[in-house]
Image: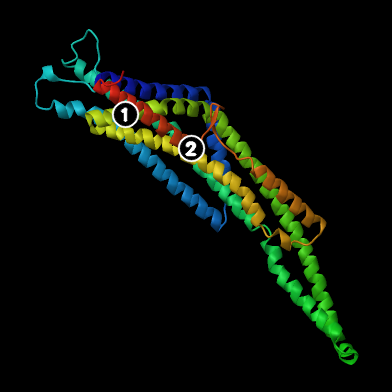
Amino acid sequence: FHDIMENIQLSITLLSAILKLMIAIARKDAIIDAIIFSEKYFWKVKYDSFGEQVLNECERKGIILLCSLAFAVQGTAVFYISRPLITYSGLNDTHRALPFRLYVDLPLTVTPYYEITYTIQCLSIIHSGICFFCFDNLLGILNIHIVGQFKILQHRLETLCDECTSHVHDESQTNYFETVDVNLPREIFDKNKILRMQNDVVTAGVKKNHSDLSTQSYDELKKCVKQHLFLIDYVERLEYVFSPMLFCQMGFSSLLICLTGFQTFAVRRQAFMLQLLAACSQTLIFTWTCNEIITQSMEIANYAFSAKWYTIPDTEEGRSIRKGLMMLMMRSRRACSLTAGKFHVISLQSFMNILGTTSSYLSILRQLSDGTYD
């Protein structure tokens, strides 16, 4: 029974890698375009200090993601490769074993058949492991960077009207001197004509400066709207490329985690523990990064509302800024997301559903193993 479960588990892993590879080959041009697109507009762009900080954080998260999943998957592959050498070390040639059983009409324990077959299986294991996690790593890294771009856009919206805010104090201070002059007696008012003229000049300058700042803020808002549309289009590109892969992954994740967990608790081999860690990490990575896209894309509305729009004067540009922010907030209420084959939105709730389904399957398998299931 345990051998059957192990064969099914390895077959599912291999089938998942093959399907992902076939989808990647079919959509090779779209994947290459997405990478070039990211390099041109995300990675080789000059940012301010906040943008550099966000980009460095994305790079750090990407390195952690890549190393953790690669360690778990390739650690499993190395264990399968080294297990025959460790288990049958010091025995004669008749006890030679391969990483996986192979049923052919050849003397596989005899040199050079054993060495050739062992090398072929080792290379197959390594490349299967790479195909198993490389596309999920790519999706995770691209998702992390698109989340970083949403954070940069949030910062730009939040500081959209800061220049206008800094000049409100100047205008109020000038109006204060005007009021003082009006309330002074006539003889004192005549003596302060020069001061009043100076205040008029300052007031006109502040109002003109306010108008210029409103125009500047309106131009910045148009850039933010263009960037928002740009990010929405980019998420749709990722949806086209990775939606079939996510559909396959969601279909196999429950079975794979269930079978690997069953083998881990029943047989207690280190390889199964690493494979269970790899399967859970893989599922968590793409559900977490997709959930971040949903969260940060909806946060755009809150940051747009946090912009100090109430400090903008009631001019044509000021009214356009307020209307533009309202439209941006309305659009942000519809979150950007990735789906599994257009059927289901990927989020952390998907990961919880997979774990719930896995626990049900695992209890059935344990009952079958103990012979108590009717």
Query: x, y percentage for residue 145?
Result: 52, 44
Q: How is the image coloured?
A: rainbow
The residue shown at (71%, 58%) is 309
Asked whether 372 or 323 is in front, the reply is 372
Callout 1 amino acid:
Thr
**Which residue was labeled with disc 2?**
349
Dot 1 or dot 2: first in sequence order is 1
10 Å neighbourhood of mark 1: few (<14), some, or many (≥20)?
many
Query: x, y percentage for residue 162?
Result: 66, 62
**Which residue was labeled with disc 1?**
260
- Placement of 124 over or under 326, stated as above or below: above
- Placement of 250 over or under 93, stated as above or below: below
The residue shown at (61%, 41%) is 231
Cα distance in 3D space between marks 1 and 2: 22 Å
10 Å neighbourhood of mark 2: few (<14), some, or many (≥20)?
few
Asked whether 278 or 108 is in front, the reply is 278
